[in-house]
Structures are given as structure tokens and as C-alpha cells.
Image (cartoon, coloured by chain):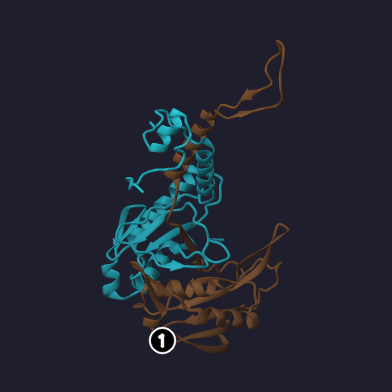
Chain colours: A cyan, B brown
């Protein structure tokens, strides 16, 4: 028996030219390729549904530089209010410097921070002027670095209260719970 | 192009076979995806509420009503090895218990740059204490029990947040506008001393 070079053997007996071309592997690829719309639309729909489910209408407050927020589990949703950021050395109200933490840490005494007090008071007055006849919400959000000492936190807390902001909220990172996120 | 076949047509009538144009549909999906991707928020921030009780200026001209003081839970976190839970009514101590405080090395878990501090045993004990001594447990009661946090000046903020988180783990039912929902059992504030 003669020895043949190995190759494709299927469909060799079909006496049609285009079948022979396919069988021997010399068929040409079609120039126009079809795109399956069904799978593409399926993919787009799944992506839209996923993004809609993870969409947050409450938006996001930017975290100041040098602030690492601690995390907590039993939290509430964020709201729109003035933000007092406290990093290792500075106190900022909506990005405007309002004192530094060094002097508080050095004296190690709870104290009213005058710059912070004046800025918050001015913000309160401005709110009252722009919202005549409405009750002042008295909410302030503290964005404090995780390593800041309690004396600074308590001083900022008390100064905010004296400036008329009695509802003080601490901004934290959210640890997702098994039963859902923020309340 | 995709189409919907709704049966055969004939004669000069308008064909019952109509095509649904998929291009605007795909455009709409793509624009929606682009919008949602741009506005997506991947890091979720939240807040822990605290109440700043500042006494008002004394008014000698107004006669003060005599109200029996409510029981308040004081949490002492000055010691490094224990928390002390004290129920006080006015100046009188009603009840006091110690809760072991785990060493910082045990309580802290590193999560990237964040030091995650948890006190599950404290949360459990506060829950038990509230069930035994809490004054506002009825769902129709709109007031919350008061919790006062005592800390020294050197304590780092992450430990304070961990204790507040443990306090807020205790939940109670509250009926608001005919709807009952779970709310924290306590309102937290700081002691000034």
C-alpha cells in the first residue's frame, strides 16, 4: 500500500467544486461579517441594569486631602450640609482654612476654635438670608482623619454646637452589611 | 435588521410585516451606559449622627418646670482594658457594669490605609443593658434614650467611631406616619469633661 501525505480526507468524495475547496481548506472567507445583534443587545441591557442598580442619587462628597476616614457599619445616608474637615494639622470649612489642630493638641484642653466658630456662624447667617422663613437644619458634617486626637474632635464638635449646629454628623466609610447598606 | 412578523399581507394593502429599527434602540442603550458610568459612585460614604446638647442661657425670669431626670447611659472609655457602662438618673448611679476591652492589636483590622476597629462584645452588652434599663422601648415613643461618651483627650478618633458604631448597633422599632421602621435605640453625645 502506498504511503500518502497526511491531510484532510472528509467530504473528498463530494463532486462539487465549492465543497472540494472547503474540504481542502482553500475556501475564501466572506468579506462581510455578520454581527449578532441579539447577544449585543443582551449585553447592553445587562450592563444598563447593573449600572442602574448601583446608581446612587445622593451623590458623593469629596474627601479632603490628608484625611483617612474610619469605617462603620450602622450608618445613615449622607446629606447636604457644611463639611468641616480635620486632617493632621488643619481645620477646613468647605475647603476654607478655619484653624489648626496643633495648638489644641499642645494645650491638651477642650476649647472653642474662634476661626471655625466665625466661619460656621457666617454660613448660618447666609443660609438664613437665602432661605427666609425656613427652619435652619443645624446640621454639620465632620470629616475627621482616623488618627486625630479626641481633644481636637471634641473641640470641633463643641465649637460647631456653639455656632448653632446641634446635629453633628461624623462622615465615615460604609461597611456593607449582609442585610443592606445605609439606613 | 430585526423584524416582527405579524402574519401575511396581500393586494395593495399596507404590509403587515413591519421592521423595528434597532439602531435608535442601541443608541439609547449606549447613551444610558455612558451616563451611568460617568455618574457612577464606587466608594460609598455615610455618616454617624451625634447630638450636641448645649445648655441654653439660664432664664431667672422663667420658672423652671420640675421634671424627673431620665436615665442616661454613660460609656467610659478611658481605661485601656475595659469599658464601663453606667446608667445614671440625674446625679444618681443606678447601675454600672464593666465590659472587657480587647487590646488595640486585637480590635484593629487593617483594610488598606484604614484601621478598622470593631467592638462586637461591647455592642452586645449595650443591647442587653438597653433591654433591661432603656426608658424608650415602645414603638410609639418618639424619644430616644441618651448615651454619653466619656473619653480622654489622647484617644484616637477611630476608637471613638468604633464605640459610636457599637452603640448604634442596638436598634428599636419606631412607628412614624403609620409605618414601623428600625431606628437606633440611642442618641449619642460627648461628655465635655
Check the picture and name the quadrant holding the N terminus of chain B. Answer: top right
Q: Toward the viewer: B54 or A105?
A: A105
At 42% from the left and 66% from the top, the residue drawn is: A157
In this picture, residue A35 sits left or right of residue B178: left
Number of residues whose C-alpha sits closer than 10 Å to that of mark 1, classed few (under 14), some (14–19) or many (20 or more): few
Quadrant where the image shows the C terminus of chain B: bottom left
- Residue visible at 36% across and 77% down? B153
Above or below, B92 against B10 in this view is below
Res B190 seen here: no
Above-or-below relation of B145 to A143 = below
Mark 1 belongs to chain: B
Q: Residue furthest front?
A: A1
Percent position (x, y) of residue B184?
Answer: 59, 69
Residue under label 1:
B79
| Helix, strand or loop status at disc 1 | loop
Residue A115 in view of the camera: yes
Q: Is residue A154 left or right of residue A78?
A: left
Residue toward you, B115 or A108: B115
Residue name at image x 56 percent, y 83 percent: B125
In the rendered structure, the answer to whether residue A87 lies left or right of residue A177 reads: left
State the residue lying farthest toward the top. Answer: B12
Residue under the point 35% across and 64% down: A68
> Percent position (x, y) of residue A92?
33, 57
Q: Nearer the viewer, residue A164 or A77?
A: A77
Residue B149 drawn at (x, y percent): 48, 77
Amino acid at each position: 500500500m502506498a504511503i500518502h501525505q497526511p491531510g484532510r480526507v472528509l467530504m473528498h468524495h463530494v463532486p462539487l467544486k465549492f465543497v472540494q475547496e472547503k474540504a481542502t481548506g482553500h475556501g475564501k472567507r466572506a468579506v462581510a461579517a455578520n454581527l449578532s445583534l441579539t447577544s449585543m443587545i443582551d449585553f447592553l441591557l445587562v450592563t444598563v441594569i447593573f449600572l442602574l442598580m448601583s446608581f446612587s442619587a445622593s451623590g458623593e462628597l469629596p474627601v479632603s486631602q490628608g484625611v483617612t476616614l474610619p469605617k462603620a457599619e450602622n450608618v445613615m445616608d449622607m446629606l447636604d450640609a457644611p463639611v468641616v474637615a480635620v486632617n493632621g494639622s488643619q481645620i477646613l470649612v468647605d475647603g476654607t482654612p478655619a484653624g489648626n489642630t496643633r495648638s489644641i493638641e499642645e494645650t491638651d484642653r477642650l476649647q472653642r476654635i474662634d476661626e471655625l466658630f466665625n466661619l460656621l456662624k457666617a454660613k448660618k447667617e447666609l443660609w438664613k438670608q437665602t432661605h427666609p422663613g425656613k427652619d435652619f437644619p443645624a446640621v454639620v458634617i465632620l470629616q475627621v482623619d482616623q488618627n486625630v486626637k479626641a481633644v481636637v474632635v471634641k473641640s470641633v464638635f463643641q465649637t460647631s454646637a456653639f455656632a448653632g449646629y446641634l446635629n453633628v454628623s461624623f462622615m465615615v466609610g460604609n461597611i456593607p452589611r449582609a442585610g443592606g447598606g445605609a439606613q | 435588521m430585526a423584524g416582527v412578523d405579524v402574519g401575511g399581507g396581500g393586494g395593495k394593502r399596507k404590509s403587515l410585516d413591519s421592521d423595528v429599527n434597532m439602531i435608535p434602540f442601541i443608541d439609547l442603550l449606549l447613551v444610558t451606559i455612558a451616563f451611568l458610568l460617568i455618574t457612577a459612585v464606587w466608594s460609598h460614604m455615610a455618616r454617624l449622627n451625634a447630638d450636641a446638647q448645649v445648655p441654653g442661657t439660664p432664664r431667672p425670669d422663667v420658672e423652671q418646670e420640675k421634671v424627673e431626670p431620665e436615665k442616661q447611659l454613660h460609656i467610659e472609655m478611658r481605661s485601656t482594658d475595659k469599658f464601663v457602662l453606667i446608667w445614671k438618673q440625674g446625679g444618681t448611679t443606678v447601675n454600672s457594669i464593666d465590659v472587657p476591652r480587647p487590646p488595640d492589636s486585637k480590635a484593629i483590622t487593617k483594610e488598606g490605609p484604614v484601621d478598622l476597629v470593631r467592638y462586637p462584645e461591647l455592642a452586645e452588652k449595650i443591647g442587653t443593658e438597653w433591654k433591661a434599663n432603656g426608658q424608650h422601648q415602645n414603638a410609639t415613643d418618639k424619644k430616644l434614650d441618651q448615651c454619653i461618651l466619656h473619653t480622654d483627650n489622647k484617644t484616637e478618633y477611630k476608637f471613638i467611631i468604633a464605640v459610636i458604631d457599637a452603640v448604634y448597633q442596638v436598634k428599636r422599632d419606631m412607628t412614624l406616619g403609620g409605618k414601623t421602621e428600625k431606628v437606633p435605640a440611642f442618641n449619642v453625645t460627648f461628655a465635655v469633661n
